[in-house]
Every structure is written in C-alpha cells, then in structure tokens.
Image: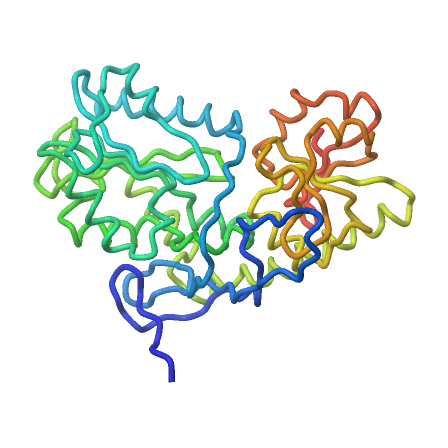
C-alpha cells in the first residue's frame, strides 16, 4: 500500500481531492509537430489540506521542461503598477538590497526595483526586499521554500509574495489553472499560516486584475513592524478584507472548492460544442496562446486539428511543435494572419487588449477574437 499524501506545507495526511482531471499530458511538453505520439499522460488532481487549508497538486511524476513563453504586456504593466503601489506604501527604501525568486515562465521586477534605488544581491544573500513573483508555487516542498525565502529577509526587511488567488480560480471557474509543476494554489489564510511557521506576519495586501485576480502580500517578521508601525497580523485593512472575502467564498471548504469539477465539465463541453458549430457552419477557427491552461482544456474537450486548425503563439520556442496530446500544430502569429480565420479562440484572456492591438489584421479581414473562458457562461466575443 502506498504512503498517504502529506501536505506540502504542514505535512498533515488529512485532506480531500477537490478536483480530478484524470490523466493529462505534461503541460510544458510540446512535442515536435511530426512526432506522432501518443504522449505520456499522468494523473492531475488538486488536494485540499484539512490541516492548514493549502490547495495543492497531489502528485507530479513529470520532469519540467518550461519552454520560455513571450512576456505579455499585461504582466509587464502589472509589475509596474505593483512596484509603484508598494513604493507609495513605504516598503521600498532607496539604497536597499533586493533578491528575487521569479517564475520559470518569465518576468522580472529587478529593473523596476533598480530604478527605485534598490540593488540586487547574489544568490543566498540577505536582502531588505525579498520578492517572489509566481515562483513559490513551483516548489514541491512548500514549507522549505517559504523558510528559504524568509531566512533571506534582513532585519527590518519585507517579504513580498505574489500569487494567483484560489478565490479567483473558484470564482471564475479556472479549473485549468491546475497543472503539473504548479504545486500550490494559495488563499490568504493558509499562506498566513505558512508565514507564521517561520515567524512572519502579513502586513498589507494589494489586488490586481491579472489572470482574473492576483494578490501581492507584504509580510515581515513578527515584532518587526511596518512602514506605518503597528504589529498585529492584518493591521492594514487590506489584509482583513482579503481574508473576509475569501472566507465568504469558502476557499477552505472542500465542498465549495469542488465546484471546479463542474466547471471542468461545462467549459470543456462548451468549447467542443462551439468549435463543432463553427465547423458545421463552414467557418475557419484557429487558436491563440499555446499556454498550459490551453493544454488541459483541449484535452478534456477532445479537440483535434479537424476542429481547430492551429494554435498561434508568440514564443519561437514553440513553433514547429504541437499542443500536447493533440495533432494541433503551434504556429507563428504570421501564419494565423495569413490564414484569415473567421474566428480566433483566445486561450489567454489577459491578452485580449494587447493581441487586438498587435494583430489588427485579424479583425480587418472580418475575423473575430473569442475568449474561450467565457464560452458557456457569458457572450464570448471580444468587442
């Protein structure tokens, strides 16, 4: 008999599977287009810890490949906004030192922080500002990863953690945010417990529209105070408001989190149904955004090249490859424009404004951008 799963943070063995997507291909393995497959598939399940409330990937037998994607303008703009807000709140002091734990998918705040007078330190060195921007979720041992980051915060310094909120994932039915290589899905109360285990306290929180709703949390050592002084968890109203909103949504209630299972069924059916209708009407459809979220969606929806001719992506590393577990090729944006599709299924809603601006030829030729995450819920066209 196999050992029970133990929480990646508190090590409790008590918990519940709240989302089961069956066997799925590794979302970062894009095989060459001429490689026939079948591609390996692995169990993909979300487990909610009854001990600390952390939602997490149950098992992950995959080996990360992480082909570097193109950095979207929305991510760059959000980073600029975040640094500005944190600076205005008094957390960034000129002449300070900073260390960054970034995401393997790209994006860095170091240049923005340097412009504010903060100098980057070497690996393992202490810093006044230790930043983790979507990096923590890539660590299989969550307790060790939090401890490592906290240990590098110098006396009086601050730890900044940015994360895609589980509350957002539930509220918007973003079930396909679950993927191999992403080990944790955070809500604020469990993250506060993880911080408490290393002697840190959340002090302030900021919310952003990126990915439908992300959070940036500032934490310091207990007793370390904050720019406006004060010493209790959540003495800034922003933290208390975030905790209250997430509690009302039920982010630690297995029955409420299981709503994602229903979303997985309805969204996949809606995509397949829409593509079948487009084909029956004689309309040509291509996709845009060969992202991890598109992998599980296309697989669960049973979509192949007969329904979706290709998926365009700005990342040259993905060109000449295909979407995992399908025969759908990944092509450069120029090929999408040349195909003059009647509709383009956009798998990354955050790109809607940017992509309509950078590829105006699609709409000029009579094509329509369609937000696939809105299919089956609200009108999907990007107007």
Quarter of the image with the N terminus is: bottom left
Give the residue at x 8% y 40%: 223
Give the residue at x 84% y 40%: 284
Q: Position of residue 197 (x, y in %)?
A: 17, 54
Give the residue at x 31% y 65%: 7
- Of 229 and 369, the residue lying toward us: 369
Q: Position of residue 311 (x, y in %)?
A: 70, 40
Give the residue at x 28% y 18%: 114
Quarter of the image with the C terminus is: top right
Residue 238 in sight in this render: no
- Horizontal relation, residue 319 to residue 162: left or right: right
Q: Position of residue 76 (x, y in %)?
A: 46, 25
- Of 152 and 188, the residue lying toward us: 152
- Of 100 and 278, the residue lying toward us: 100
Q: Quadrant of residue 153?
A: top left
**Colour scheme shown:** rainbow
Q: Residue furthest bottom?
A: 1
Q: Is residue 244 above or below residue 225?
A: below
Q: Is residue 6 above or below residue 126?
A: below
- Total labels: the figure holds 0
Q: Quadrant of residue 321?
A: top right
Residue 210 in sight in this render: yes
Q: Position of residue 160 (x, y in %)?
A: 27, 36
């Amino acid at each position: 008999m196999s050992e029970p799963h133990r929480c990646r943070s508190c090590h409790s063995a008590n918990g519940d599977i709240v989302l089961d997507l069956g066997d799925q291909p590794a979302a970062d393995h894009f095989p060459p287009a001429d490689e026939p497959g079948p591609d390996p598939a692995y169990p993909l399940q979300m487990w909610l810890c009854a001990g600390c409330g952390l939602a997490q990937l149950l098992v992950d037998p995959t080996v990360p490949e992480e082909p570097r994607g193109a950095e979207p303008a929305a991510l760059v703009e959000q980073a600029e906004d975040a640094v500005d807000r944190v600076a205005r709140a008094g957390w960034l002091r000129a002449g300070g030192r900073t260390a960054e734990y970034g995401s393997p998918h790209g994006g860095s705040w170091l240049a923005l922080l340097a412009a504010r007078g903060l100098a980057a330190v070497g690996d393992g060195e202490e810093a006044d500002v230790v930043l983790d921007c979507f990096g923590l979720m890539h660590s299989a041992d969550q307790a060790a990863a939090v401890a490592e980051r906290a240990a590098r915060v110098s006396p009086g310094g601050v730890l900044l953690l940015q994360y895609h909120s589980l509350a957002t994932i539930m509220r918007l039915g973003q079930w396909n945010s679950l993927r191999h290589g992403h080990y944790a899905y955070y809500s604020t109360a469990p993250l506060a417990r993880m911080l408490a285990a290393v002697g840190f306290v959340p002090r302030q929180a900021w919310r952003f529209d990126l990915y439908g709703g992300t959070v940036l949390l500032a934490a310091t050592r207990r007793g370390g105070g904050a720019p406006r002084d004060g010493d209790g968890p959540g003495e800034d109203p922003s933290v208390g408001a975030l905790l209250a909103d997430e509690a009302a949504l039920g982010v630690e209630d297995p029955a409420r989190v299981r709503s994602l299972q229903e979303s997985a069924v309805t969204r996949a059916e809606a995509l397949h149904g829409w593509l079948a209708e487009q084909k029956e009407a004689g309309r040509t459809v291509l996709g845009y955004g060969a992202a991890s979220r598109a992998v599980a969606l296309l697989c669960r929806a049973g979509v192949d090249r007969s329904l979706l001719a290709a998926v365009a992506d700005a990342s040259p590393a993905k060109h000449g490859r295909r979407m995992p577990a399908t025969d759908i090729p990944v092509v450069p944006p120029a090929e999408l424009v040349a195909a003059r599709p009647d509709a383009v299924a956009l798998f990354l809603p955050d790109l809607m404004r940017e992509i309509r601006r950078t590829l105006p030829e699609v709409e000029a030729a009579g094509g329509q951008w369609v937000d696939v995450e809105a299919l089956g819920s609200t009108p999907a066209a990007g107007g």
